[in-house]
Amino acid sequence: MTTALWVGRRRAVLWTAVWLVLAGCEAAPRSAAPLNAQESISRETFVAWVERISEPSGYFDTDNLISNESGYLNVIDALHDRRLQGGAYVGVGPDQNFSYVAELRPEIVFITDVRRDNLLHHLLLKSLIERAPSRVEFLAGLHGVRPPTDAEEWHGSDIDEIVAYIDTGWSDGAEQDAGLRAALHAEIAESIRAFGLSLSDADFATIRRFHQTFMDAGPSLRFTTFGRAPQPYYPTYRQLALETDLDGDQASYLATRERYEVVRELQLANRVIPVVGDLSGRHAMQEMGSVMREMGVAVTAFYASNVEFYLWQAGTFARWGENLSSLPLSPDAVVIRSIFTNSGRSHPSAVRGYYATQALQPAATLTRGGFESYWDVVTRDVLPLR
């Protein structure tokens, strides 16, 4: 995604329900002891953490439903080779995070974004994933397609075959499956109500609109901003699902049954916590760190996309570094970032054929600070991708 979500004038659209809870966050339930990695978090604790960590919402001109980083998997081999697993994972934006989660297998996941709409989007994804034992059932639910009657036999299918099924089902059933899609909307709304969060009618309308967008566009959906056409180099949902790592292996969270089940088990255990928070804000990051300490976990990886570009422009980059330093970090923790630049300079991690560059940096480098420019930020101590 282009996380211009953090740029410019932040219109503080107060989320009244959350703000009232935050005002009394000292009363929120806290873990008395570190949770076992296999232990489910109660729905009550899930709700308490979402509300306790979240800040008032900000604004940007995109729904950001899918990533626009076609080479988002170019870091997977390096993450694998560094044997970074367990602990806490933090990331911004949409389901691109789940592919990093599937590789890293963390104990807890926090998805943060300055927009409240991103939280609502992740509630939609949580509901869809929980109801779908298989990848084909998840993608069918997401795109409003009837799943195969023998869905259990699709567990080991190649992702190419699954996407082809969804493509065909979406093309053939766009009109005759209006009843199916209406039933899906109702089922998803009911399951999200059962999560226990305080959500308004407007929230449910937004969730329905997001789901309808996936249904209307099918696997050809691209990242878009309001009033501007998608760029030709933005990948479709189909391309993101079929994307490969640098070794040529399909490595999204939908690529294999095993990767999908890592994400689904975390969702079923309520261990994917979507929150509203600015990386340079005064509340969410600090409270997230407090929850991690109560759990007894440290950050293994932090996916920051290209948020830092906008923080640097806004003059709030130093606060982001302070916030990262305030988190419990494992000694080998990394920052995963995306770099979009038209400066004419080639980034050390650039891969031919990709507009955006994915890169890894030790978190310790970022916490030490002392950067002279944004280019200094994204090129200092860059870790090799191979």
Image: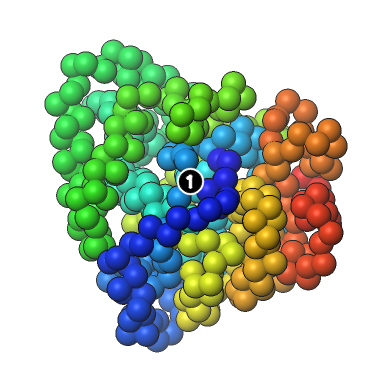
Q: Which residue is mark 1?
A: 60
Residue type at mark 1: give it.
Phe
Q: In this orientation, which residue lies closer to the viewer: 289 or 89?
A: 289
Q: Position of residue 176 (x, y in %)?
A: 18, 16
Q: Position of residue 280 (x, y in %)?
A: 59, 64
Is residue 183 something that shows in the picture? yes
Residue drawn where x is 28% and y is 66% of the image: 17
Q: For the image shown, how many numbered marks are present on the structure?
A: 1
Q: Quadrant of residue 84?
A: bottom right
Q: In this orientation, which residue lies closer to the viewer: 100 or 55?
A: 55
Is residue 336 something that shows in the picture? no
Badge 1 density bin: few <14, some 14–19, many ≥20, Cα 10 Å: some
Q: Is residue 327 left or right of residue 386?
A: left
Residue occupying the far top of the picture: 172
In this view, 74 is above or below 116: above
Q: Secondary structure at mark 1?
A: loop
Q: Name the colouring of the figure.
A: rainbow
In this view, 171 is above or below 210: above
Residue drawn where x is 34% and y is 70% of the image: 19
Q: Position of residue 56 (x, y in %)?
A: 41, 63
Q: In this orientation, which residue lies closer to the viewer: 218 or 341?
A: 341
Q: In this orientation, which residue lies closer to the viewer: 12 or 215?
A: 12
In this view, 279 is above or below 231: below
In this view, 126 is above or below 186: below
Q: Position of residue 213 (x, y in %)?
A: 34, 31
Q: Is residue 177 left or right of residue 110?
A: left
The image quadrant where one finds the N terminus is top right
Residue drawn where x is 32% and y is 20% of the image: 170
Q: Is residue 368 left or right of residue 69?
A: right
